[in-house]
Image (cartoon, rainbow, N blue to C red):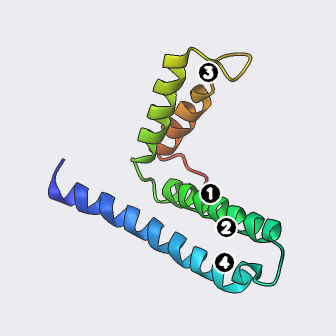
C-alpha cells in the first residue's frame, strides 16, 4: 500500500469523523442534554446521541466507500465462527453483509 492510498484512507476516515463530530456537537447543543429533566430522560438522550453518531459514521463510511468497514464485518464473522452460533435460520448473518460489500465494491451503489 503506497503513501497515496494511505493518505486517501485517512482522509476518508477524517471526513467521516469530522461530520460525525459536528453532528454530535449540534445534537448536544440543541438538546442541552435536557438539563432540567429527570435522570432517565438525560440518559436516554445521551444513549440516542451515541447511537445516532454510530449510525451516521457507518452510513458515511459506506457512502465514501471506506474499505476499513470490511474489517469490522470480518471481525464479526470470525467471532461468530469461533462461537459456532448462527443468527439466521438459513445460515450466517454475515452472508448478506458480504453480498452487500461485494455489491458496493463493484461500483453498483445506489447512486449509479
Q: CA distance from mark 4 to mark 1?
A: 14 Å
Q: Is residue 106 visible?
A: no
Identify whether 97 is placed above or below 10: above
Q: Residue at point 75% right, 83% down?
A: 35
Q: Left of 14 or right of it: where is 5?
A: left
Tell me which label, 4 or 1, sits earlier in the chain: 4
Residue at 42%, 70% in the rendered image: 15
The answer to whether one can see residue 60 in this image is yes
Crowding near the residue tagged with mark 2, few <14, some 14–19, many ≥20 C-alpha atoms within 10 Å: some
Q: CA distance from mark 2 to mark 4?
A: 7 Å
Mark 4, secondary structure of its residue: helix
Which image quadrant for residue 7? bottom left
Residue 51 image position (x, y, % from top left): 66, 58
Quadrant of res 92: top right
Dot in front, 3 or 2:
2
Q: Which residue is mark 1?
A: 55
Pick whichever of labels 2 and 4 is earlier in the sequence: 4
Q: Which residue position holds label 4?
A: 27
Could you tell me which quadrant the C terminus lies in?
A: bottom right
Foreground disc of the pair 2, 1: 2
Q: Nearer the viewer, mark 3 or mark 4?
A: 4
Q: CA distance from mark 3 to mark 2?
A: 30 Å
Q: Which residue is mark 2?
A: 49
Q: Which one is earlier in the sequence, the residue at label 3 or at label 1? A: 1
Residue that mark 3 sits on: 92
Q: Residues within 10 Å of mark 1 (few under 14, many from 20)?
A: few
Amino acid at each position: 500500500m503506497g503513501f497515496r492510498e494511505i493518505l486517501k484512507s485517512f482522509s476518508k476516515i477524517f471526513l467521516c469523523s469530522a461530520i460525525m463530530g459536528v453532528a454530535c456537537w449540534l445534537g448536544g447543543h440543541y438538546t442541552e442534554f435536557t438539563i432540567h429533566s429527570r435522570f432517565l430522560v438525560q440518559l436516554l438522550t445521551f444513549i440516542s446521541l451515541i447511537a445516532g453518531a454510530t449510525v451516521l459514521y457507518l452510513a458515511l463510511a459506506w457512502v465514501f466507500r471506506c474499505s476499513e468497514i470490511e474489517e469490522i464485518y470480518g471481525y464479526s464473522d470470525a467471532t461468530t465462527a469461533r462461537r459456532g452460533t448462527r443468527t439466521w435460520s438459513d445460515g450466517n448473518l454475515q452472508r448478506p453483509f458480504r453480498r452487500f460489500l461485494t455489491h458496493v465494491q463493484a461500483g453498483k451503489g445506489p447512486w449509479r
